[in-house]
Image (spheres, helix red, strand yellow):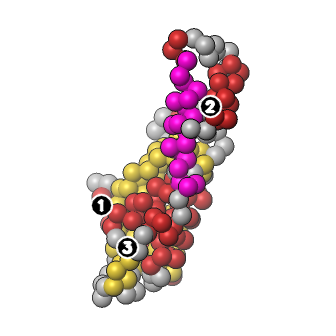
Amino acid sequence: MNEQLTRNYREILQGVGENPQREGLLDTPARAAKAMQYLCHGYQQNLEQVVNGALFESDNDEMVIVRDIELYSLCEHHLLPFIGKAHVAYLPTGKVLGLSKIARIVDMFARRLQIQENLTRQVADAIARVTDAAGVAVVIEAKHMCMMMRGVEKQNSVMSTSVMLGVFRDSYNTRQEFLQLIRNSQGQ
């Protein structure tokens, strides 16, 4: 446990006018420090560890899509959560990535202080680097607590970001096929 982080949370409680010695808050600084370490454990991971050799030879050159990957991240501007889902696709060129590794790559980057735009780019670049795919597409849709709980307080707003690489950027038809397939998953 990071003792400095625990002390910092104790100071935050005092800063908002609370008494960290109050019965209900006695263990809160340590719990909050532990929670923050978990929520940011992506800093302790790297792409090679996450993939762990799960790249397999394949003759498949058709689109591989993993839809509706749940993600939880913290906005780097307010340290408030944003929660959503990622849709990831790639066009293999002789190698396919183990299915769970795509979700683990999303999690690795999401579990860092983040903005959604950068998260989308990081996932796309990582999938491209690992698979050497002909193209990669990533769409992330998320609700941001910094917009829902404070500021404009808009409860139904959803932010969508996308990154298209390779064939997904160059071919309108490939991009449209991907977008249509993820729309179908949402019942639209």
Q: Nearer the viewer, mark 3 or mark 2?
A: 2
Marks 2/1: CA distance?
Answer: 46 Å
Q: Quadrant of residue 56?
A: bottom left
Q: Give the residue type that dot 3 points to.
A: Ala
The quarter of the picture where the N terminus appears is top right
Label 3: element kind: loop
Q: Name the residue that disc number 2 marks.
A: 6
Q: Give the residue type that dot 2 points to.
A: Thr
Q: Nearer the viewer, residue 162 or 100?
A: 100
Residue 95, relative to residue 18: is it above or below?
below
Residue 75: % across, % down: 59, 45
Residue name at image x 35 percent, y 56 percent: 68
The quarter of the picture where the C terminus appears is bottom left
Instruction: Rate crowding at label 1 as few (under 14), some (14 to 19) or many (20 or more) other CA atoms within 10 Å.
Output: few
Q: Magenta part of the protein: which range?
A: 26-44
Circle nearer the N terminus (3, 2): 2
Q: Name the residue that disc number 1 marks.
A: 184
Residue name at image x 68 percent, y 15 percent: 17
Circle nearer the N terminus (1, 3): 3
Residue 177 is one of the magenta-drawn residues: no
Q: Quadrant of residue 80?
A: top right
Q: Name the residue that disc number 3 marks.
A: 54
Q: Give the residue type that dot 1 points to.
A: Asn
Residue 7, relative to residue 142: is it above or below?
above
Q: Quadrant of residue 150?
A: top right
Circle nearer the N terminus (2, 1): 2
